[in-house]
Amino acid sequence: MTRSITTKFILAFLLVGLIVIGLAAVFIWGTTSLEFNNYLQDQRQNTFVAAAKAFFEQNNSWDGVEAALLQQGVLQVPPQPGGNQPPPFALLDANRVVIISSGPYLSGQTVPVGSPGQELPIKVNGNLVGTVIASGQPLIRNTVEQQYINNINRALLIAALGGTLIALILGILLARTLTRPVNELTSATRAMARGELEQQVPVRSKDELGELAASFNQMSTDLARANQSRRQMTADIAHDLRSPLTVIGGYAESMRDGVLKPTPERFDTIHTEVQHLQRLVEDLRTLSQADAKELSLNREPVSPSALLERMAQSYRPLATKQGISLKTESETGLPDLQADPERLAQVFGNLISNSLLHTPQEGEIILFARQEQKEIVLGVQDNGSGIAPELLPYIFERFRRGDPSRQDGGSGLGLAIAKAIVELHGGSISAESNPSQGTTVSIRLPK
C-alpha cells in the first residue's frame, strides 16, 4: 500500500514525539524514584540515630534499646503486606558490637572498621558511644509513600499521553503546511502536461518551498511566453514564406501556360523574391545555430573606430541617396576588441538598415564608440520616427517590427540575430527611443 507524503510526515513527527516523550518519562520516573528513596533513606536513618542517641543520653547504656525503639515505632515501617519491615540499619556499640541486627549484621557480631555501608557515629558529650550502619537491605515504602510515587507515575503517564496527542496534532498541521505547496505544484504540473502552460501557484512562505513556488511561477510564465512566441513565429514564418512563394509561383505558372511572356523584368522580380527567401532562410539558420550554441566566432583584434568607418563607407551611398547624413563619432585611444569582425558587421548592418528605414529625408544617423569603465560601447543613433513605448521591450524578439503595420520586406529577425551575436561575444544590447525623436541602440562589449 502506497502512503502519501502527508502520512509519512505525520508518522515521522509522531514517532519522534513518542521517542522523546518516552525517553523523558523514563528518565524522570527513574530519577524521581531514586531521589525519593534516597530522601526516605536519609530521613529514616536520621530518625533512627536521633532516637538511639536520646535513649543513650537518658539511660547512659544500650541495655533495652531495641525494645524501647520498637515501642517508639522507630524500628519498623507501618504494616506492609507480609508483615512489618524493619529499617535497613544496624546499631553498633562503642566497641562495634552489633546491638540491633539488620541484614548481614547479626546481634553480637563485631563489625570491623571499613565494612561496606554508610556509617553515622553517635556521640554523647563528645564521646563516641555507638554507630549506625546501613545494612543494604531494600527500602520498603509505606502506604502514603507508595501512593505518592503512584501519583507521580500517573502524572507522567497523563503527560506522556498529552504529549503524544500534541505531537500528533502538530504533525498533522506541519505535514499539511509542508505538503500543501507540493500538492499545488503537482496539480499545476499536471495542468501543464495537459497543455495549460500558464499556471501560477500561491507563494505561501519565504523558505525553500516558497522559492520553489516562485521559480515555478516564473518558469510557467516564461514557458507560456515562449510558446506564444513560437506560435507567433510559426505564423510569421508562414506569412513571410507565402508572399514570395505566391509571387514566384504565379509568375512561373503564368509563363508556363503562356499567359505571360518571359521578360527580363519578370525574371528580376522572381530573382528578388528568391533573394528574399534566401535571406529569410539564412536568418533562421543563424538563429537556430545560436539557439544550439553552434554559432562560431572567429575572434581577432578589432578596432572600434575602424569598424565604424567600414560600416559608414558601406552604407553612406544608400544614406546619401535617401538624403540622410551618416557619420561616425569615436573616442580616441579606444583599445581593440577581441571579436569577430564579420559578425559585428552583420549586427551593425541590421541596425543601420533599420535606421535607414525609419529616418526621414534630411535626417541623421550617427555610429558612435566610447569607453565606459570596463566596457566599450558601440551603437547607432538616429533621429527618425522612434519606437512606441509599448513595443520597445520586445523589439529584440523574433519577428518583432518597430511598426507592425509597416511591411518593408525585412524578416523581422534582424534585431534577434543582433542580440544573439552580441551575447555570444559576452556583451549586451539595449535600445532607447522616443516617438518622433529617434532611437539609440547601444552595444556593450567587454574590453
Image (cartoon, rainbow, N blue to C red):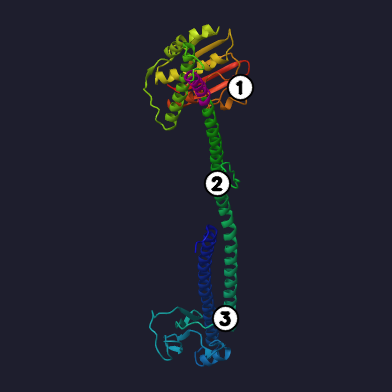
Q: Can residue 426 be seen in this view?
A: no
Residue drawn at x 53%, y 40% is 219
Identify the element where label 3 is drawn: helix
The image shows residue 411 at horizontal and vertical percentages of: 51, 23
Bounds of the magenta segment: 241-256
Q: Is 112 on the left or on the right of 206, as rendered?
A: left
The answer to which quarter of the image holds residue 167 is bottom right
Give the residue type that dot 2 points to: Arg
Residue farthest front in this picture:
258
Give the residue type that dot 3 points to: Gln
Question: Residue 253 lies in magenta, yes or no?
Answer: yes
Residue drawn at x 60%, y 21% is 403
For residue 194, the mark is 2
Q: Can residue 254 be seen in this view?
A: yes
Identify the element where label 1 is drawn: loop
Identify the element where label 2 is drawn: loop
Q: Which residue does the numbered mark 3 point to in the structure image?
A: 146
Q: Is residue 114 above or below residue 186?
A: below
Q: Is the magenta stretch mostly helix, strand or loop?
A: helix
> Residue 205 or 103: which is nearer the viewer?
205
Q: How dense is the environment of label 1, judged by Cα within 10 Å: few (below 14), some, or many (20 and up)?
A: few
For residue 405, the mark is 1
Of the 4 image quadrants, the one containing the C terminus is top left
